[in-house]
Amino acid sequence: MIDTHVHLEDDRLIDDVQQIVADFDKDGLQFVINNSCNLQSMIKAYELAQKYPNVYCTVGMHPHDAKEFDSKFEALMMEYAKSSKVVAVGEIGLDYYYDLSDRATQRDVFAQQIEIADKLHLPITLHIRDAYGDALDVLTAQKNYLNNGVLWHCYSGSAEFARQMAKKGHYFAFGGAITFKNANKDEVIRSVPLEQVLSETDCPYMTPVPFRGKTNYPKYVRYVVEKLAAVYGISFEQMEKAIEQNCKRIFTKIQ
Ligand SMILES: [Zn+2]
């Protein structure tokens, strides 16, 4: 199994990282991608990726922290991206639910990081919440820079919007939320072709059923893969294989 979105650098997991990673084999995990959110988390994510062979990372500024984006941060992104373990720019995007940075700043920093990703020949991992319209506006304005793949992390939009984006070749990662009772995500999942779907946990957040409410771990991606396999009507092993192929197609630095 592959978890394309973890936060092992989070305070809730960082003390247990050694054990979590040591258990990957036993838990059936091939590798994980640790996403960055701000300067502190990017430094930690990069260090983890350097230390552990089966931990990759991204570089980027989360929309929550967009107000902290500056040329020094950009320079560090460029520096880190030279590493073979840095596989994407993320998580970047817009979050109008929390509005922790003002919206104009979020849009501006999102657009800038799309251009950085293009310079680095890396795909982008999107965090979009309550902002699908504006996200599409930014992506459309920056379409000349979208040459290396787009991944919608923790996708929570409509089936119709997913279909439109899937036609452009975008990928979609689903996490624990699809396992919740009354989630009603089957139609949304089905709107994404099997060749464009990925599994994630967003741990320590978004814990799937049956552990909902507790700390999330990469190994719980199993419940996400199970749910995806059920919706696509294929075996767990076929689902795992499809995710692996999709992952290596969009994250070209992972082979
Ligand atoms: Zn995240």
Image (cartoon, rainbow, N blue to C red):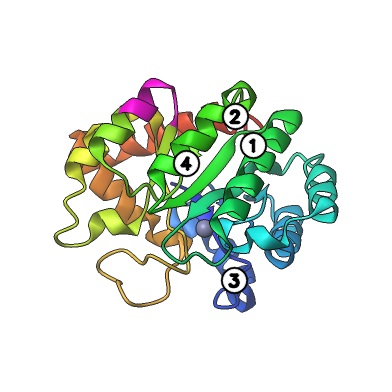
Dot label at residue 135: 4
Q: Reply above or below: 152 against 128.
A: above
Magenta stretch: give its range. Answer: 164-170
**Residue beneath the point at 30% across and 72% down:** 211
Numbered circles on residues, count: 4
Dot label at residue 114: 1
Q: Which comes before the other along the chain, label 1 or label 2?
A: 1
Q: Which comes before the other along the chain, label 3 or label 4?
A: 3
Left or right? Give the position of 12 relative to 234.
right
Task: Specify whether residue 192 is in view.
Answer: no
The three-letter amino acid code for the residue at tag 3 is Asp
Q: Which comes before the other along the chain, label 3 or label 2?
A: 3
Q: CA distance from mark 3 to mark 2?
A: 31 Å
Q: In the image, which is nearer the foreground, mark 1 or mark 2?
A: 2
Q: CA distance from mark 3 to mark 4?
A: 26 Å
The three-letter amino acid code for the residue at tag 4 is Ala
Q: CA distance from mark 3 to mark 1?
A: 25 Å
Q: Reply above or below: 102 against 126.
A: below
Q: Residues at badges 3 and 1 in contact (C-beta under 8 Å)? A: no
Q: In the image, which is nearer the foreground, mark 3 or mark 4?
A: 4
Q: The residue tagged with tag 4: helix, strand or loop?
A: helix
Left or right? Give the position of 23 relative to 80.
left
Left or right? Give the position of 69 relative to 215.
right
Q: Which comes before the other along the chain, label 1 or label 4?
A: 1
Task: Specify whether residue 9 is in view.
Answer: yes
Q: CA distance from mark 2 to mark 4?
A: 11 Å
Q: The residue tagged with tag 2: helix, strand or loop?
A: loop
